[in-house]
Amino acid sequence: MAPALTGLTMHELTDRYRRGDARPSEVTEAYLARIEKLDDQVAAYVTVVREAALAAARAADERYRTSQPLGPLDGVPVAIKDVFCTRGVRTTCSSKILENFVPPYDATAVARLTAAGAVMLGKTNMDEFAMGSSTEHSGFKVTRNPWDLARVPGGSSGGSAAAVAGELAAAAIGTDTGGSVRQPAAFCGVVGLKPTYGRISRYGLIAFASSLDHVGPITHDVRDAAAMLQTLAGVDPRDSTSVDAPVPDYTAALAGGVAGLRLGVPREYFTEGMDPEVERAVRVAIDRLRELGATLEEVSLPTTDYGLAVYYIVAPAEASSNLARYDGVKYGLRVPGGRDLIDMESRTRAAGFGAEVKRRIMLGTYALSAGYYDAYYGRAQKVRTLVKRDFEAAFGRVDLLVGPTTPGVAFKHGEKEDPLAMYLNDVFTVGANLAGLPAVSIRCGFSASGLPIGLQLIGRPFDEARVLRAAHAYEQATDWRARRPAR
Amino acid sequence: MISREDVEHVARLARLALTDAEKERMRVQLDAILTYIDKLRALDVDGVEPTAHAVRLVNVMRDDEITPCLPQDEAVANAPDPSGEFFRVPRILEG
Amino acid sequence: MSSPISDGGSRRLAVATRPDYEVVIGLEVHAQLLTRTKMFCGCPTSFGAAPNTQTCPVCLGMPGTLPVINRRTIDFGVRTALALNLRINTASRFARKHYFYPDMPKNFQISQYEEPLAEEGSLEIDQTDGTVRRIRIQRLHLEEDVGKLIHEGTLETAQASLVDFNRAGVPLMETVSHPDLRSPEEAAAYLKSFRAVLVYLGVCDGNMEEGSLRCDANVSIRPRGQTELGTKVEIKNVNSFRNVQRALQFEVQRQAKALDAGERIVQETRLWDADRGYTRSMRSKEFAHDYRYFPEPDLGPLALSSVFVDEARAALPELPRARRQRFVAAHGLPAYDADVLTQSRALADYYEAAVREFPHAKIVSNWVMSELLREIAADDERAIAGAPISPARLADLLRLIEAGTISGKIAKDVFQKMFRTGEDAHAIVDREGLTQVADAGALDTLVEQAIAANPRMVEDFRRGKTQAAKAIVGQVMKASGGKANPAIVSRLVEVKLAKA
Ligand SMILES: [Mg+2]
Ligand SMILES: [Zn+2]
């Protein structure tokens, strides 16, 4: 019974809860047992909170018993990326510099999930400070792709994506700064949604690049993504960049299909270097959408290539600033025996940050330093405007953009040693971060080697409903969801 | 072309103690990344407004109302070197 | 420190300053805004709480926390900018200023850089010689304060330091003047007027002891007639009118001596040591000062509407200088009185309330300046507002003098008693029987006794020494315990001496 339970979507689970065919504590037990059994292979979790999870589950049991459930997340066991602060629960960002940090506050996203009855199983592994695309750059462990343990789950939200794909959680949340929800979702064959910038509060999300960081759900299917977004979305007085715009009923908006939708296919999203298997699968998926009634049109996003360069200035610059606070004074690691303050701080940061984080701090500090600001950060902010205009122009003609999430499928551990090669993974995803647009990645096929392939849909600002509707229509019309990783 | 001195200056600004090996690796890698980034120079951005945020919000403010503080013990709970009610730091050399 | 007129010191300085060099000074003033809560979080700003008890995740710079602008800080900034005739920028934004220091939780300060709240205005200061100087102001911007470091021992010898973040995040308003000040006393006068403006506006309590108002000075000197500026030196930590003068005087002398000796002035930051009375170089690694400013990505820009600005302008109170001028014009007060009485808004309000009750401007002014200010400092807003003698009661007292019920001399004692006990004048005068003896019958006897008791004085009077009469009047007043009405007594004495 238990293994069956762990394969279910949120809505399948809560249907059973309501019918009394299953209880949240029972399902939570099943997940905890599975984590116990499998997570030393997958390594999705950094921290598991067994007791707290069971307590929350029992409270949910009670609500269902008295038929007063809180909604579509009540009693659903979820995984939280360790970038989100959790009151009283160690929050590390997968960095040695925060190894023992216990926040006295909850991230708004976490507070909203738990208020909706979600049961937090634990905190998931990630690339340190969300800097990476493989979850190999964690200060603690290397997460593996449930479809092939020799391969990466993508990143930086690799732990959350692997947890959902590996049935170690019913759903999860991650963060997406340059593709960190969509790319691991694609590599792990799950649904990853990055909403519009400002749609979900960033309060308590440990900042990597403030103007690019987004919170997003990672789920088994699109319906679950809609339900989770419903809970997470909305203005937060603690986040000055969260937007006070009405939150539509995303689940209701799933109906209606793609008939009459104008889909734009960006020419630049099909490049020389990309994996032909990915290109083929995505082209087939786009045809399927046409068969379902959408009209197709080729569009151009000329600055696509520049987007990545902009991203690799803006993100490190903001990161170098956001990470200045880790100095061994207020919290986290301190390397003892420093001669003086500067010595202590410099050695603490050298020991506490991994190579990739140091690289980006250096890059960002350089880009902001005297004499280089205009050439790098200043110019990048202007090109960012051009990137945004490209999308605006495209959305003047079409309702959604459709293309691949990544140029390739999940790669092998250690395959991409060169930082630049790793960065190129984000080429199709960074655009939506720079322009703050809602975008989703859904499964659209498999490589010959049996690895999932991701289809990306990008919408206008605050048009999550339409993005989800198209994704849902495709999902319903295909049966990719049926396939499961071994074990 | 980024020099060893650049690397050392930036490392000082960023408070990072790097080994000689790290400095050299950093120099090579930063150089490669910056060369890639230099493609931005190809674009004409004269008169283009910079974008700091994709979604532009103005005048977001809060009222001047007191909210609860952390209890002192919680405030210093995470300090690596707490000294009762304070955060303790090694001696500060001015420069 | 801030007595009504603190130019006793500056006179000494005037002598000390060198005639052969021109002094060029610019002041940077950081004022703590009188808000309930911090700049970007809801923690209280009150002074003197136990260490790290007025902090939250936001002002401790904990991971994932975000700033939210306190609306009142913008209101106060705009109010001040308007009072100083600065141009309010319709678009302004916050920026991050980076440098590592343990009193700064995020290792960057949220401040304003390229787009400050306001730019280009001025403050007019009246000088002791009656002339007016217009000091231009470059910019006004808002930023967050840092925490407090307590060194175990002195900074030089401390093996460790302790950090208290209660102050971290408290709103500061930084105002930078152009280098228009030409002497240490002028700098002090600027600071004094500036402080008065802030206090009048109610945006800052002006309390320098508690650090509500902090001042850094940029000073350079150049041979008179030379057009280009000399090398400027920044002096930190000059936190009282007196210290501004002392520090600048010292620095001017130091630079003058250096130039005399043919040395070059090094551009540097020097710390004023008020106890030892000298400035010393901070010789911090200036090369490392690369603040890497960039727009604060956690805060959107400010776009202040002209409507908002106009409303703020309309709500401005009368400012010290205008009020001082009105006191001269409307109440016919001497400039000196007007200057003293406008030291603080509370004092000026007190004075005007008293004059409304007792419309003799100069008399009220004398009593406020000599009696009230003997008890309370002119700039102690709180003390004056809560003075045990209300303006109405002071007016009552003055009416008793006017009516001849008590003498001015007695009135001063009554004032003291009123101040100590909080009673009104009538109660004290009646209980202690202080009303003047005006009944001629009672005085006759006193006068006769005095004349009988001083035959020599009578002799002198006869010989034409008229002041002998005054001496006898004095005797009578003494005998009456000061309660006799001097006018009546002298009339009686003259009459009786004539008869005698
Ligand atoms: Mg400042
Ligand atoms: Zn606070």
Image: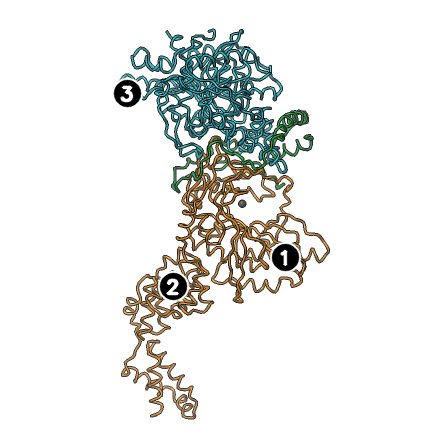
Chain colours: A cyan, B green, C orange
Mark 2 vs 1, N-terminal side: 1
- Determine if marks 2 and 1 fall on one subunit: yes
Does A71 sit left or right of C249 as displayed? left
Ligand 1 falls in quadrant: top right
| Local secondary structure at mark 1 | helix
User: Marks 2 and 3, how far apart in space?
Assistant: 68 Å
Label at residue C351: 2
Residue at the outermost right position: C262
Chain ID of residue with mark 3 = A
Give the left or right position of residue C70, taking residue C105 as reference. Answer: left
Query: Callout 2 environment at 10 Å: few (<14), some (14 to 19), or many (20+)?
Result: many
Between C14 and A156, which is closer to the camera in this rendering? A156
> Which mark is on residue A68?
3
| Residue C4, visible in the rendered structure | yes
Residue type at the position of mark 3: Gln
Residue pointed to by mark 1: C252
Provide the chain ID for the residue under circle 2.
C
Does residue A441 lie above or below C422 as drawn? Answer: above
Hey, which quadrant is residue A118 in on the image? Answer: top left
Q: Is residue A87 visible?
A: no
Q: Quadrant of the C terminus of chain C?
A: bottom left
